[in-house]
Amino acid sequence: MPEEVQNIQTNATREIAEAKDLGMLENLWRKYLGRNGQLRDFSLKLKNITPEDRANGGKIINEARQSLEQAIGRRKSQLQINNSSAPETMALDLTLPATDQKINFGHLHPHTQMKDRVAEIFQSMGFQILEGREVEDEHYAFDVLNIPASHPARDMWDTFWLDAKATKLGKLLLRPHTTSMQVRVMEKQEPPLRVCVIGKCYRHEATDASHEHSFYQIDGFVVDQNISVANLIYTLNTFLAHIFGQEVKTRLRPSYFPFTEPSFELDFACLNCGGKGCQVCAQSGWVEILGCGMIHPKVLAAAGYPKGKYTGFAFGIGLDRLVMMKHKVDDIRWFNSGDLRFLRQF
């Protein structure tokens, strides 16, 4: 694989340097870096190799991607400079109406860009990438996650219940979290499991600068023998380092979630001030980013796993929040505003 990726990087670098206009450059981006690009194909093949080779392969692919993104950026700047300084070759007719010669190319929404990046990182660590059902029943959304009907924790999720006939597994709803996929997957697959679910969730709550009634959530979980909190910390630190492009200092704080025990909130040292204290981190030096913990034994039992044989960890993070932190966006409502002035920045 390293030699094949190197050949792709060499060919792509040469073609980028020879690109004559922005249209050709856009086509090269799709060819090598797009959703169906050649590097994306290699990412999908990682799940079929050993864990040791998978980690090394993921690193090689990420380095190649970063190198080609930089090469495309440099060539784009060169072409824009050349176009702005090129002499006018056509006769100037002052009677013609003014025209805008600038061509604006469309691109992926920042949410989609982050979804693809997150999937790429977790695939390089051997995770399956799933999306799951947006219309769920209360059995998988709550009951098997140690949140029965009488449990006060149900109030933590402001649920959109559907006016539809209930199934044998309970009333239907729009899923309030992608955690509803955990037991669905466990019932069909035996450990070892590494799964990452990325999908849309819905909660009946007021919108403001940090809350939306519909949002994307990333939910990951690992189940095997002898899984510990150390495995959880290593996985999350690796993920955050790839997302932010640098090593990130993290800490765990005790918390509560019905489906994990023990439960934690994970904070990371503010990248804006280096942990010294600023407005972004409310002068604390730390930024809360996700909830996590060890999968509750009752959840493993609900999946039909033998008591005491397996352990696992799980974590959940809002993808919208991740984009806001990475790009320092101050209001979540911008993403669904349809304002092209905002979207063209990504």
Image (cartoon, helix red, strand yellow):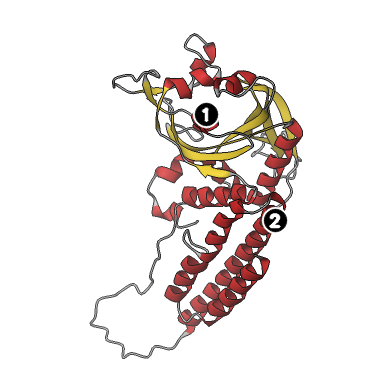
Farthest-out residue, left: 95
Callout 1 crowding tier (Cα within 10 Å): few <14, some 14–19, many ≥20: few
Q: CA distance from mark 1 to mark 2?
A: 29 Å
Q: Residue at x 67, y 54 (%)?
A: 54
Quarter placement of the N terminus: bottom right
Left or right of 123 in this view: 180? left
SS of the residue under disc 1: helix
Of callouts 1 and 2, the N-terminal one:
2
What residue is drawn where x is 58% and y is 22%?
A: 299
State the image coordinates of residue 257 (x, y, percent, origin top left).
60, 21
Instruction: Residue 187: give its label.
Output: 1
126 or 13, nearer to the observer = 126
Query: Does any portion of residue 259 appear in the rendered image?
Result: no
Side of 187 where 280 appears, left or right: right
In the visual, does 266 lie left or right of 324?
right
Residue 321 spot, x, y in % from top left: 55, 39
Q: Residues within 10 Å of mark 2 (few under 14, many from 20)?
A: some
The picture quadrant where one finds residue 240 is: top right
Q: Nearer the viewer, residue 145 or 214?
A: 145
